[in-house]
Image: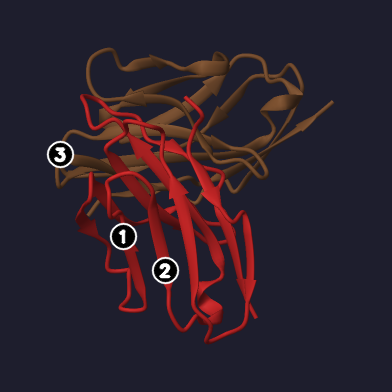
Chain colours: A red, B brown
Amino acid sequence: DTGVSQDPRHKITKRGQNVTFRCDPISEHNRLYWYRQTLGQGPEFLTYFQNEAQLEKSRLLSDRFSAERPKGSFSTLEIQRTEQGDSAMYLCASSSGQGQETQYFGPGTRLLVL
Amino acid sequence: AQSVTQPDIHITVSEGASLELRCNYSYGATPYLFWYVQSPGQGLQLLLKYFSGDTLVQGIKGFEAEFKRSQSSFNLRKPSVHWSDAAEYFCAVAARRGGSYIPTFGRGTSLIVHP
């Protein structure tokens, strides 16, 4: 069990650019979640996958955001035409999908949009 | 929709003192409740969770929490705080959505520990 990993850990970009983040869940975890955390706030749910199927999307996930999990393993979160309001920590979590499952969080990707 | 209120933005305690962090939730059905801790540069770590059964829940690192339905509360306690407990603490209530439990987090309480 190597834990949830996220790449990159930090990203600085200019407004209008596209960015992509990657999340590698704990192996054999079939559920994967994305959250956004702004300064001074708790994490807010964005979306989640069971295997490769995207089952839930928050209203926070605007048209500029897209998430994929093509083979049911790692996932990517892309933000197109970034805005300054997108600056936040993007957290990924995974769970086994069984019983009273616990979500295990990665260290996050901190995005700064200039 | 569910919500969580953590009324204290910051809490300062001396090392060795007892700790109680407050959490109130709003949810129409039986709540699933969690406490997470987040240290700088780290992801969230689950301290404890309540799904059903005994309303006093034991967690890791010596933490416990008590579910009080009549008060809609799930306060976190520790009898003796260590300097390493300084971190951000988040309470969350989860609703079952699409087969999983999706937590709604409070805004967090920052714990400062004085030597």
Tag 2 subunit = A
- Which residue, given by chain and number where applicable, does mark 2 sit on? A78
Which residue is pictured at 71% across the width and 19% down the height?
B17
Task: Say what secondary structure mark 2 lies in.
Answer: strand
Residue B84: image quadrant is: top right
Which residue is pictured at 27% across the width and 33% down the height?
B32
Residue A74 horizontal side relative to residue A17, left or right: left
Tag 1 subunit = A
Q: Are marks 2 and 1 in contact (CB under 8 Å)?
A: yes
**Which of the two marks, 1 or 3, is nearer to us in this view?**
1
Furthest residue in direction front, as rendered: A71
Q: Position of residue A110 (x, y in %)?
A: 60, 59
Q: Of the residues shown, which amino acid type is indicated by label 3?
A: Ala
- Which residue, given by chain and number where applicable, does mark 3 sit on? B29
**Residue closer to the observer: B111 or A69:** A69
Q: Of the residues shown, which amino acid type is indicated by label 1?
A: Glu
Q: Of the residues shown, which amino acid type is indicated by label 2?
A: Glu
- Which residue, given by chain and number where applicable, does mark 1 sit on? A68
Label 3 and label 2: CA atoms lie apart by 35 Å
Label 3: few (<14), some or many (≥20) within 10 Å? few
Of the two numbered discs 2 and 1 on the same chain, state the one appearing first in sequence: 1
Q: Position of residue B67 (x, y in %)?
A: 33, 25
Task: Say what secondary structure mark 1 lies in.
Answer: strand
Furthest residue in direction bottom, as rendered: A16
Q: Position of residue B42 (x, y in %)?
A: 61, 40
Same chain for mark 1 and mark 3? The answer is no
